[in-house]
């Protein structure tokens, strides 16, 4: 059911807290803090980011519709798994999100990043990426990976600057406005 965010009471009733983990994860970077994403973080702004055509121009999220229920279902999909869904905070403002899909049998984690509208180009993405990558490597992950289209120059720059190395290319993998772009993969090993 589509819930109008203009009706605060109805919204709160529909958006009951979801707790994914007992102890909350908190990782401090130089500019940002990463904490477990909670259902309270599904705000109007957050839903607007996911529906923003410019922000999502390189992401497959642009082919999906996002609302309170789909966002709660996404959050719930992390329950009882090794995977992380994190909110990125700058001071007291939610500025973005991160995911980490972990495979303990292989010692790998694949991470993703979203910095919200109005918070880009300030170094927050770089700081958040480096903070989560270093945390995962420090806690025993053998190989941290990430991927993005070659035309997403900000994301390519983030992965190169934090010391990741090239980990493969899928040539002409995805279309952006009808033009095929390569998907670039990057990786950082623990040692
Ligand atoms: C890609 C994204 C994460 C970058 O985050 P950010 O906080 O704006 O990036 P930073 O401010 O940390 O800058 C990182 C680098 O990107 C560059 N950059 C920032 N915004 C940019 C832009 N709009 N165009 C080109 N480069 C840009 C910075 O100059 C910096 O490069 P440098 O180290 O060579 O100077 C953010 O734009 C985003 O969330 N986009 C939508 C979702 C997405 O594409 N996610 C990536 C898929 S995993």
Image (tube, helix red, strand yellow):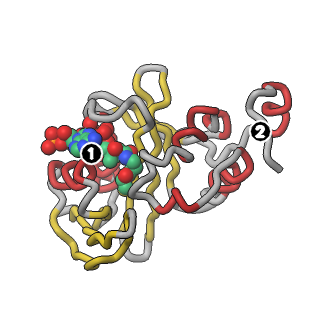
Q: Is residue 66 above or below residue 36?
A: below
Which element carries disc 2, helix, strand or loop?
Answer: loop
Left or right: residue 168 versus residue 140 is: left
Q: Position of residue 62 (x, y in %)?
A: 52, 57
Q: Is residue 175 visible?
A: yes
Mark 1, Cα crowd under 10 Å, few <14 / some 14-19 / many 20+, is some
Q: Residue at x 44, y 30 (%)?
A: 89
Q: Quadrant of ligand 1?
A: top left
Q: Which residue is denoted by mark 2 in the rendering?
A: 15
Q: At x 43% / y 76%, what residue is drawn?
A: 105
| Rendering quarter of residue 17 | top right
Q: Nearer the viewer, residue 127 or 9?
A: 9
Q: Is residue 39 left or right of residue 13?
A: left
Q: Quadrant of residue 165?
A: bottom left
- Number of marks drawn: 2
* Relative horizontal placement of residue 94, taking residue 150 as reference (left or right): right
Residue extending furthest toward the bottom:
171
Task: Report the residue that reaches farthest toward the top.
Answer: 92
The residue singled out by tag 1 in the image is 130
- In front of the other: 61 or 18: 61
Q: Residues within 10 Å of mark 2 (few under 14, many from 20)?
A: some
Q: Is residue 60 above or below residue 85?
A: below
**Residue 161, position in %: x, y?**
15, 49
Q: CA distance from mark 1 to mark 2?
A: 32 Å
The label number, if any, that marks residue 8 in the structure image: none
Q: Could you tell me which residue is drawn at 44 percent across and 70 percent down?
A: 103
Q: Is residue 131 visible?
A: no
Residue in the image at 44% along x and 57% along y: 100
As rendered, which of 119 and 128 lies closer to the eye? 119
Query: Percent from the top left, x then y, of residue 146?
Result: 32, 62
Compared with residue 59, is residue 85 higher up or lower down, i.e. above or below?
above
Which element carries disc 1, helix, strand or loop?
Answer: helix
């Amino acid at each position: 059911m589509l819930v109008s965010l203009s009706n605060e009471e109805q919204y709160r009733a529909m958006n009951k807290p979801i707790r994914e983990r007992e102890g909350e994860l908190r990782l401090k970077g130089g500019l940002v803090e990463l904490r477990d994403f909670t259902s309270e973080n599904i705000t109007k702004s957050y839903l607007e980011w996911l529906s923003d055509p410019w922000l999502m121009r390189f992401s497959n999220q642009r082919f999906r519709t996002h609302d309170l229920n789909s966002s709660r279902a996404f959050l719930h999909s992390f329950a009882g798994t090794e995977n992380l869904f994190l909110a990125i905070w700058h001071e007291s403002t939610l500025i973005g999100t991160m995911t980490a899909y972990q495979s303990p049998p292989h010692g790998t984690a694949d991470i993703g990043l979203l910095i919200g509208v109005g918070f880009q180009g300030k170094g927050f993405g770089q700081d958040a990426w480096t903070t989560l990558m270093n945390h995962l490597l420090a806690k025993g992950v053998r190989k941290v990976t990430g991927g993005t289209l070659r035309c997403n120059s900000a994301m390519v720059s983030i992965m190169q600057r934090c010391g990741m190395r090239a980990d493969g290319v899928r040539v002409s993998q995805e279309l952006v406005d009808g033009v095929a772009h390569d998907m670039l993969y990057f990786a950082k090993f623990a040692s």
